[in-house]
Image (cartoon, helix red, strand yellow):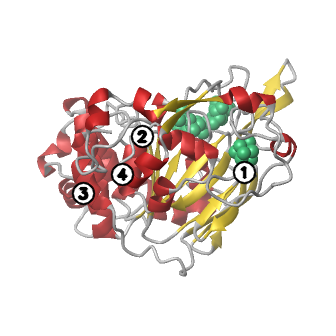
């Protein structure tokens, strides 16, 4: 996203992401439908299919990045795996234990192991409480007395996240956005969790502060052996800190791959479109793919997602089979799972079906890179273009309009 991300580039290598170990988190067929109710009797007339059957695992010690347009279900997924929301279907296993439908008392031990960091460092801290009270809340809620006492432990946590122990008696409004997010991180780490789910942890922060917070999270991961799921809009954040990346579209994972494989050779057309908004750092790819893909149209409603492949209404490769048959998320290359009938740079999964849907012909505009690239950027030599500078928000290429449905209501969000 910017040069300020430079420091975050060191975050590339993570310990303990070996593939053969049992994953820390395993998710199978996870579903969350928010019921839409109407009338006096509150009859259910439909559902927002926020998460609609996703499978993935999170390996011990790794960072899994999750990206996708607004409304595709990222936050819902995060709240499901931290069990802040009750799943409508599927299975969640944490460290070998089925936690899909654990009740409050059953969840108690898990509450210590899994923590969430939220996007809004203003909204998530109670303005009437002191920092000491906020960061020590998890101890009170869990009835835990840390060694050396609560105050000492909170001061240690404040130091750990780069704040002064003197801040104990101050209030949130006395801090900047970045400092508040550090407070949120200190609170999340209080109970020594094993997994932290961070929902857009830096997107509310000033660009110049984002890299600092990302670097802090990265250092804490190494120091404390944390496992992260980081949800982001911003490809640059995910790129620098992730070991693997899952791309979501309308409640589904459409591609899941090792970070480098995903950036070097995306196989799902949607991933390719998201990435085509990012200037290409690799000189080989830069010459090979000389166009940007501007997706046309809006994200369809998750109340009535398109049949077959959900992306077919915006995909420039869509054929009849895409309209009728949902492509499974299949491992097409080692470690790279893709849900597409006609993947990029790969053997066609449906070679008999070659006639493009009419919508496909209009779905995307392929803009020659020479035209769309900034003149200054076009003059850059390959050597000058580093990963750290080559970032742009994915929203640049992909318009989104999925807003929460006004009609929808649920009694399940907590
Ligand atoms: N409590 C709820 N009740 C009804 N619908 C909901 C609820 N929470 C989320 N949704 C809907 O579910 C869909 C997915 O929302 P979600 O917040 O998970 O998306 P997101 O990918 O996190 O989006 P963003 O990038 O904007 O944060 C959206 O259509 C949203 O309106
Ligand atoms: S080619 Fe077909 S299956 Fe693949 S993303 Fe496009 S519409 Fe979906
Ligand atoms: Mg969200």
In the displayed structure, would residue 46 be above or below residue 391? above
What is the number of the mark on residue 342? Answer: 1
Q: Secondary structure at mark 1?
A: loop
How many other residues sit within 10 Å of disc 1, few (<14), some (14-19) or many (≥20)?
Answer: many
Question: What residue is shown with label 4?
Answer: 283
The first of marks 1 and 4 along the sequence is 4
In the displayed structure, would residue 79 be above or below residue 395? below
Q: CA distance from mark 2 to mark 4?
A: 13 Å
Q: Is residue 341 left or right of residue 270?
A: right
In the displayed structure, would residue 249 be above or below residue 143? above
Give yes or no for contact between labels 1 and 4 (Cβ–Cβ under 8 Å): no
Question: What residue is shown with label 3?
Answer: 157
The image quarter containing residue 272 is: top right
The first of marks 1 and 3 along the sequence is 3
Quarter of the rendering occupied by the C terminus: top right
What is the number of the mark on residue 371? Answer: none
Q: Is residue 413 left or right of residue 11?
A: right
The image quarter containing residue 391 is: top left
Question: What residue appears at the point 29 percent right and 34 percent down from the top-left corner?
Answer: 377
How many other residues sit within 10 Å of disc 4, few (<14), some (14-19) or many (≥20)?
Answer: few
What is the number of the mark on residue 278? Answer: 2
Q: Residue 360 versus residue 46: which sits nearer the camera?
A: 360
Q: Is mark 1 within 8 Å of ligand 2?
A: yes
């Amino acid at each position: 996203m910017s040069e300020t991300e430079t420091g975050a580039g060191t975050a590339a290598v993570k310990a303990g992401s070996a593939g053969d170990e049992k994953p820390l988190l395993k998710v199978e067929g996870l579903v969350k439908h928010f019921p839409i109710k109407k009338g006096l009797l509150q009859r259910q007339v439909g559902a927002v299919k926020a998460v609609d059957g996703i499978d993935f695992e999170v390996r011990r010690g790794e960072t899994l990045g999750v990206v996708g347009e607004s409304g595709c279900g990222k936050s819902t997924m995060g709240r499901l795996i931290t069990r802040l929301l009750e799943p409508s279907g599927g299975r969640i296993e944490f460290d070998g234990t089925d936690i899909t439908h654990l009740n409050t008392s059953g969840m108690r031990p898990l509450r210590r192991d899994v923590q969430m960091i939220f996007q809004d460092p203003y909204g998530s801290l109670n303005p009437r409480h002191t920092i000491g009270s906020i960061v020590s809340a998890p101890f009170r809620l869990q009835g835990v007395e840390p060694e050396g006492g609560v105050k000492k432990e909170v001061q240690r946590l404040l130091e750990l996240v780069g704040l002064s122990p003197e801040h104990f008696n101050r209030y949130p409004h006395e801090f900047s956005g970045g400092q508040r997010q550090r407070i949120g991180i200190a609170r999340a780490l209080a109970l020594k969790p094993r997994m932290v789910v961070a929902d857009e942890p830096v997107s509310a922060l000033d660009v110049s502060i984002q890299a600092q917070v990302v670097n802090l999270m990265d250092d804490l991961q190494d120091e404390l052996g944390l496992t992260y799921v980081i949800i982001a809009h911003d490809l640059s954040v995910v790129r620098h800190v992730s070991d693997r990346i899952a791309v979501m579209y309308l409640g589904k994972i459409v591609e899941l791959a090792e970070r480098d494989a995903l950036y070097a050779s995306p196989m799902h057309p949607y991933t390719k479109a998201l990435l085509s908004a990012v200037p290409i750092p690799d000189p080989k790819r830069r010459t090979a793919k000389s166009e940007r893909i501007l997706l046309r149209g809006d994200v369809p409603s998750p109340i009535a997602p398109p049949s077959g492949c959900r992306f077919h209404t915006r995909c420039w490769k869509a054929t009849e089979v895409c309209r009728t048959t949902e492509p499974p998320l299949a491992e097409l290359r080692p470690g790279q799972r893709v849900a597409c009938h006609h993947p990029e740079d790969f053997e066609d999964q449906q070679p008999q079906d070659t006639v493009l849907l009419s919508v496909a012909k209009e779905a995307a505009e392929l803009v020659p890179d020479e035209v769309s690239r900034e003149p200054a950027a076009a003059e850059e030599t390959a050597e000058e273009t580093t990963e750290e500078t080559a970032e742009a928000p994915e929203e640049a290429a992909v318009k989104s309009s999925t807003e929460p449905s006004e009609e929808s209501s649920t009694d399940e969000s907590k």
